Each structure stands twice: as structure tokens, then as C-alpha cells.
Image (tube, helix red, strand yellow):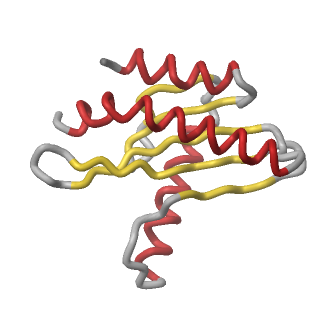
């Protein structure tokens, strides 16, 4: 399993309606992406804002998802927490730009696709967390 596998997963998202998608480390460093040139810096900014919000609001748990809706697109960022072999937790991120949510069915479809992407990426991300 490799970065190539992550890229194939993201390709599946784009082939099924997403505009762009990227896997990244928690600091925003991209691991793999499709149509993601301007998405990578946004991930870093979102990650920092989520971390700051957690600290300033004294939240106990990590961010699960950030979603920003525009009239012509939605940016979705999800946190993926991996427990490595040393029982330490490491975060990875998946971000995607999706067409606007037209109805509840579109919202559910996009959520299921992201769930699928995360589920299929877990083995690769677990391997990466041991490096």
C-alpha cells in the first residue's frame, strides 16, 4: 500500500462527482491529491483554525468535520485519527470540494463517498503513521 493507493481513492471521489480532493497530514502537508493545487493551503489554514478553536473553547475532543458552503461549491474537511502501534494517536486529513448540495440525497451521497474514501485509506494511513 502506498501514496499511489491514496491517489486512486481520491480519483474515485472525483470520478463520482467531487471537483477536487486531497489527503494530508494534520499540519496540511499534502500526501496525495487530485485537482488540488489551491486546496492544500486551505487545508493548512482549516487545520490551524480547528486547533485554535479547540484550545480557546477548551474542547476535549478533536475536530471531526469542517464544512463551508458556497452557492456553487462546498468545501469539506474531515479529520482521520489513527492509533499507531505505540498506542499514540496521529491525525490525517481528507479535504474535498464538492458541487453544491442540491438536496438531502446529495448530502448523504457525498457523506457516503467520504466515508468510503476514509475506510479504504485507513491501511495506508496506518502504515504512514509508523514512519
Answer left or right for 8 relative to 129.
right
Q: Is residue 91 left or right of residue 15?
A: left
Depth check, front residue: 80 or 107: 107
Residue 123: name its quadrant: top left
Classify 11 as above or below 101.
above
| Residue at 30% over, 18% down | 1
Point 59% across, 23% down: residue:
34
Residue 72 in percent (x, y) is at 88, 43
User: Does 48 appear above or below 82?
Assistant: below
Name which residue lies at 66% across and 30% down.
20
> Residue 64 at what x, y percent from top left?
50, 60
Q: Position of residue 63 (x, y in %)?
A: 47, 63
Looking at the picture, tell me which residue is in the foreground, 5 or 52. 5
Quadrant (top left, top right, bottom left, bottom right) of the C terminus: top left
In the rendered image, the vertical position of residue 129 relative to residue 4, given as above or below? below
Q: Residue at x 32, y 19 (%)?
A: 2
Q: Nearer the viewer, residue 102 or 98?
A: 102
Q: Tell me where residue 17 sits by quadrant.
A: top right
Count of numbered tags = 0
Amino acid at each position: 500500500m502506498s501514496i499511489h493507493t491514496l491517489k486512486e481513492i481520491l480519483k474515485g471521489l472525483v470520478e463520482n462527482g467531487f471537483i477536487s480532493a486531497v489527503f494530508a497530514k494534520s499540519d496540511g502537508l499534502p500526501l496525495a491529491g487530485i485537482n488540488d493545487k489551491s486546496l492544500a493551503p486551505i487545508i493548512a489554514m482549516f487545520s490551524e483554525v480547528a486547533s485554535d478553536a479547540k484550545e480557546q473553547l477548551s474542547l476535549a475532543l478533536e475536530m471531526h468535520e469542517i464544512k463551508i458552503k458556497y452557492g456553487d461549491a462546498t468545501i469539506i474537511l474531515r479529520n482521520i485519527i489513527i492509533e499507531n502501534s505505540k498506542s499514540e494517536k496521529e491525525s490525517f486529513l481528507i479535504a474535498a470540494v464538492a458541487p453544491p448540495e442540491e438536496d438531502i440525497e446529495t448530502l448523504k451521497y457525498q457523506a457516503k463517498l467520504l466515508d468510503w474514501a476514509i475506510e479504504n485509506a485507513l491501511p495506508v494511513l496506518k502504515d504512514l503513521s509508523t514512519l
